[in-house]
Amino acid sequence: MTASPSTTATSSASDASGLAEVNGIELAWQSLGAGGPAPLVLLHGGFGSVEMFGPNIALLAAGRRVIGVDLQSHGRSPVSDREMTFEAMGDDIAALVEDLGIGPVDLAGFSLGGGVALRTAIQHPDSVRRLALVSTVFKRSGWYPEMTAGMDAMGPETAEWMRQTPLGAGYAAIAPRPEDWPIMVTQLTTLMKQDYDWTIEARGLRPPTLIVSGDADGLPPRHAVEFFELLGGGLRDASWDRSGMTKHRLAILPGVTHYDINVAPSLATAVIGFLDEA
């Protein structure tokens, strides 16, 4: 894993942006806010960018430094011809943290970004202080069957009709080369079809981890509970002195789906509470 100095950077650490070369690709990042026990790195969901977190960005940045990263070929990050894998993108985030000199960081990822955050913590545990996984499965079969069926149905041909969606419009507005949209879609839809089961590796997660899911998410609440139990949580009464608690946490947000959990204020509340734990 190698990282070279950022190719561009603007403004101060509390309000900055840049383009960093990591592992042979370029990643765009933006920094907002200041303070907190550690910088919080935010990883968005598939087809999106850091803007996917909407009002939660300001809520999170009110008391800490937040660094939003556009993943490989997404958003402001130039399209790369490298195969898109969770493992490679996990290496990218650890390299970026090292490049910016900000580790260990708090790391929060949603959906695709949650998978990348999970791989980062598995592969580079010393880079992560605390980990928040939002709408994230530790094995592909954790999604509802209709979710995986939808992923299987997507391919390069998906790019054209998706241009007309808010995701396509968002990409066109900020990408260095909007005409590269089909390349990114092809890379991502190929990744979405790949099977994985990280049960054994996830069981050994070192950073304190918050599992967050909506009660109407793309994964059933039972999978979030299974993930929590995999980490040793929820297996016994915590006792009056909390001696039965683990360092990990679980939050099931009410009235929230896979399509709005990223902008729900209750997400910021849950994440902030977890990151600020003594």
Image (cartoon, rainbow, N blue to C red):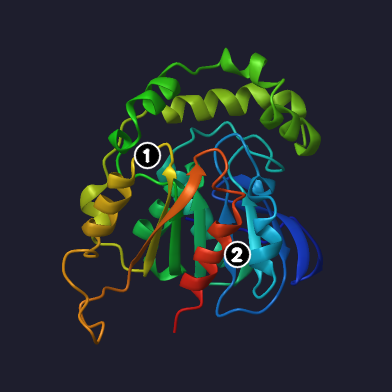
- The total number of labels drawn is 2
Spot the residue most to the front: 255
Frontmost residue, 41 versus 120: 41
Q: Position of residue 33 (x, y in %)?
A: 72, 71
Frontmost residue, 156 versus 36: 36
**Looking at the picture, which amino acid does disc 2 mark?**
Asp
Q: Answer above or below: position of 151 versus 276.
A: above
Examine the image and state in which quarter residue 269 appears. bottom right
Q: Is disc 1 placed on a helix, strand or loop?
A: loop
Left or right: where does residue 148 sit relative to residue 171? left
**Looking at the picture, which amino acid does disc 1 mark?**
Leu
Q: Position of residue 41 (x, y in %)?
A: 57, 61
Circle 1 packing at 10 Å, graded few (<14), some (14-19), many (20+), is many
Q: Which of marks 1 and 2 is in front?
A: 1
Spot the residue most to the left: 236
Q: Which residue is drawn at 67% across and 61% down?
A: 5
Q: Which residue is drawn at 62% across and 18% down?
A: 159
Left or right: where does residue 179 sit relative to residue 147? right
Spot the residue most to the bottom: 241
**Distance between the alpha carbons at the discs numbered 1 and 2:** 34 Å
Q: Is disc 2 placed on a helix, strand or loop?
A: helix
Query: Which corner quadrant holds the C terminus?
Result: bottom left
Q: Name the residue under label 1.
A: 219
Q: Which residue is drawn at 31% across and 31% down?
A: 195
Q: Can residue 69 be seen in this view?
A: yes
- Of the two numbered discs 1 and 2 on the same chain, state the one appearing first in sequence: 2
Q: Position of residue 158 (x, y in %)?
A: 58, 16
Left or right: where does residue 134 sit relative to residue 6? left
Residue 99 — which label? 2
Examine the image and state in which quarter residue 228 appears. bottom left
Q: Residue at x 52, y 55 (%)?
A: 93
